Amino acid sequence: MTDNRRRFHRIQFDCTATIEFDGRTCDTQLLDISLNGVLLTRTPEWNARCGTRCRVRIRLGDDATQICMEGSVVHIEEERLGVRCEHIDVESAGHLRRIVELNLGDAELLNRELSVLV
């Protein structure tokens, strides 16, 4: 899907993350984030398939500040894995909103993206 068809802007964001699925926990790297989900690095031994339910934990600076979300794997490439956010707690949503707000630099764009979620 091209960027002009996307409903949510992707923010390039390089930090560590953990993904849990099928009883496994794997450390990974966050490539980008949006209000709708995340793109993570993937290693070939991961056996997740599209539709696999998972939990993603993104560490922001220190281990005390993080974004936690639950979702489903929506696409898999050789070295990348996309997860759609289906549930996020209030504190994590606040952190995510702030990241998007700072990177978009436009309150109207942010409000448009938030209105799509409601």
Image (spheres, helix red, strand yellow):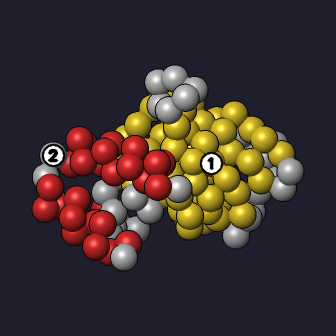
State the residue lying farthest toward the right.
23
The front one of 68 and 40 is 68
Q: Circle 2 is placed at which residue position?
A: 105
In the rendered structure, the answer to whether residue 105 lies left or right of residue 68 reads left
Q: Secondary structure at mark 2?
A: loop
Mark with earlier residue (1, 2): 1
Across and down, in percent, residue 60 comes to 47, 31
Name the residue located 56 percent from the left edge and 64 percent from the top edge: 87
Numbered label tally: 2
Q: Label 1: how many residues lie within 10 Å, few (<14), some (14-19) or many (20+)?
A: many
Q: Quadrant of the C terminus?
A: bottom left
How much space separates mark 1 and mark 2, taking CA atoms?
A: 26 Å
Name the residue located 52 percent from the left edge and 23 percent from the top edge: 62
In the rendered structure, the answer to whether residue 52 lies left or right of residue 98 reads right
Relative to 85, does residue 42 appear above or below in the rendering? above
Name the residue located 32 percent from the left edge and 75 percent from the top edge: 116
Across and down, in percent, residue 76 comes to 64, 57
Amino acid under disc 2: Gly
The image quarter containing residue 95 is: top left
The front one of 12 and 55 is 55
Relative to 62, does residue 57 appear above or below in the rendering? below
- Answer yes or no: is residue 98 visible: yes
Q: What mark, if any, has residue 112 been given in the picture? A: none
Q: Secondary structure at mark 1?
A: strand
Q: Circle 1 is placed at which residue position?
A: 56
In the rendered structure, the answer to whether residue 10 lies left or right of residue 38 reads left
Q: Label 2: how many residues lie within 10 Å, few (<14), some (14-19) or many (20+)?
A: few
